[in-house]
Amino acid sequence: MAASSPEWSSLLPDLLGQVIARLPHVADRARFRAVCRLWRSALRLQDSHRRGLPWVVLDDGAYLTPSDGRIHHLPLPMNTRCIGSTNDWIALDRVDGVTHKHTYTLHNYFSDAAVPLPELDSIIGNVPETFEIRKVLMRSTPDDLVAVTTNICKYSFILCRPGKGAWVAIPLAMPYFRIIDFAFLEDMIYAITKAENLYAIQLDEDDDGKPDVSFVKRITRHTPYPNNDRYNNDMWMGTTDYDALRQEDVPDELVGDDSDIDDDNDYSSVYDCTLSDCEEVVSSKGYDLLATYRHLVEFRGKLLMVRRQCLVSAFTPNHHTRKVEVFEADMDKGVWTPVTRGLGGGHAIFISDGFSNIVAARGEVKEDVIYFSDTNDMFDMQTGIIRSLGPISRLDACWRTCVFPPDLLV
């Protein structure tokens, strides 16, 4: 007697739910959905109720799914590391083992699609060992605009569009080499500096679609540094008259001496100097330090700055959030206004080294909570309480970014 075919449609809902929980990739879920009507309904029901936290990704491709606390590994090519992310895409940097040349690619964690970035290769393919990419951010789709900030004066701010070309800020030109975070909003990039100046960078393009910048305008002015810090105050006072600039209009005193430029690509050039980290040391407590970090996030056409103070431990790899403040940019008055009663509308903020985002609260994502993946903690905007973010503490590495599964982005 021939064995009867399995009754896939008779599987219990609990068992189907366990199977779905182990199918993070879009292609696998599509195959699951195609089995039968019951499985399709089970997947729809599961997605309607669940909203897990975004995945936390390390530079070696390992990632943690906080919902179950499991650590997975994305097989990356040799000498390849993750350097940033946007929604469900990550940016990869591969270094040739012989020539040490860098090549850059956008990779979708869920569909496995890949988009090479030869425009970046031509600009930051050959860089010194001290070179670091601070942030890679896509405006929308991977064939649209990609913005990059680095720690090298010569390439502090880059715009590229795959297949169209790239634009590079003039070395040492304000505000580009002072940018610590930025966000897209319509046809602008808004950027903040350590002094909490907010700049609007008007995006443009030539007839061939190559990205360009038409002008830069200061939106908010910095407040004076405490304790009569003459170095920082004098530095910023020297730029207060330049509220709107085009790239070709940058004054010499904001750029530097042309004699410092080395056409032979010698890395001793002043334009290849290493910029300071995107943090501000407030004070020290024994061997530990208190540092201030600032993050810029777009929310419903508004710009929010998250300022947080962290305890940087000298003997453990993890930092801890000590204080969090949230501000909204008042575009008309040119000031930062404190946000004291949450975001409103049932949303949460996710902050990581490589990417920050705001999503609707549902399931494990709690309303008016700021999640910090790099410090393993979360801040409740309503109560002001900071709590540990449990599963992420299993990760040892300091650099982390967030990847958002498709169900988190709807």
Image (cartoon, rainbow, N blue to C red):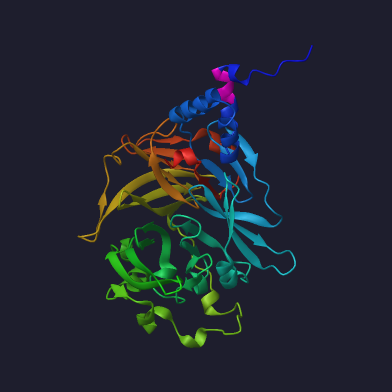
**Closer to us: 141 or 292:** 141
Q: What range is drawn magenta here?
A: 13-18
Residue located 63% across and 72% down the image: 126
Q: Can you tell which quarter of the image residue 368 is in?
A: top left
Q: Is residue 317 visible?
A: no
The percent position of residue 258, horizontal first and vertical second, equals 47, 86
Q: Is residue 210 above or below residue 323?
A: below
**Closer to us: 143 or 355:** 143
Q: Is residue 171 left or right of residue 262?
A: left
Q: Can you tell which quarter of the image residue 192 is in?
A: bottom left
Residue pushed farthest front? 1
Q: Is residue 125 visible?
A: yes
Residue located 44% across and 82% down the image: 256
The percent position of residue 16, horizontal first and vertical second, equals 57, 23
Q: Is residue 160 above or below residue 372?
A: below
The percent position of residue 136, horizontal first and vertical second, equals 50, 58
Q: Is residue 142 above or below residue 386?
A: below
Q: Is residue 35 magenta?
A: no
Q: Is residue 114 above or below residue 236?
A: above
How would you classify the magenta stretch by its main secondary structure?
A: helix
Residue located 54% across and 34% down the image: 391
Residue pushed farthest right? 1
Residue located 57% across and 16% down the image: 12
Q: Is residue 17 magenta?
A: yes
Placement of the C terminus among the 4 image quadrants: top left
Residue pushed farthest top? 1
Residue pushed farthest bottom? 259
Placement of the N terminus among the 4 image quadrants: top right
The percent position of residue 62, horizontal first and vertical second, equals 63, 44
Q: Is residue 266 left or right of residue 157?
A: right
